Amino acid sequence: MNDIQLVLNCNKILVNPKNVWNELINIGFIEDNFKHVTISRLVYDDEIYIEHNDQINYLYSHYQDVNFIIKDNFLIIDTIKQTSVCNMPNKIKIVLNQTVENLEEVLSALKAPTL
């Protein structure tokens, strides 16, 4: 486990359409230079998938073991236990330079019990 925190200065947030959340919930945080962090979960799966920039930097964790903390203009992602980790820290701090009306709703959907 890597304890070094990843910091992303997010200038754009993309959320997949709510009408597909019954299958896939996905949110992407993007810097101007196209660095990104994406968080995804298939609703019938117990794991949340977090990726940084490309598929070799990823983390899978049980949805109950991921904490999302929104404080001021930051989103902090803290994973307690990782199922599978490749080149990813367990703490990610995203500076939110853009607001999204339904950010808390998306994060709650990612943490919802499996169908």
Image (spheres, rainbow, N blue to C red):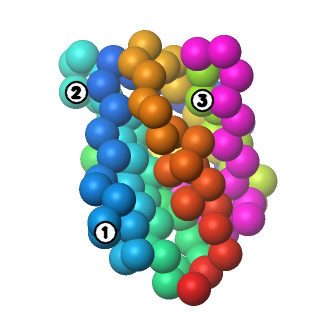
Identified by mark 3, the residue type is Leu
From the image, tell me which residue sits under label 3: 75
Distance between mark 2 and mark 3 Cα atoms:
18 Å
Q: Who's the residue at 33% across and 18% down the image?
A: 11
Instruction: Please tell me whether mark 1 sits on a helix, a strand or a loop.
Output: helix
Q: Quadrant of the C terminus?
A: bottom right
Instruction: Please tell me whether mark 2 sits on a helix, a strand or a loop.
Output: loop
Instruction: Say which quarter of the image contains residue 30.
Output: top left
CA neighbours of label 1 inside 10 A, class few (<14), some (14 to 19), many (20+): few
From the image, tell me which residue sits under label 1: 20
* Lateral position of residue 44 relative to residue 31, left or right: right
From the image, tell me which residue sits under label 2: 34
Q: Give the range drawn in magenta.
A: 58-73
Identified by mark 2, the residue type is Phe
> Against 58, is 88 above or below?
above
> Against 113, is 18 above or below?
above
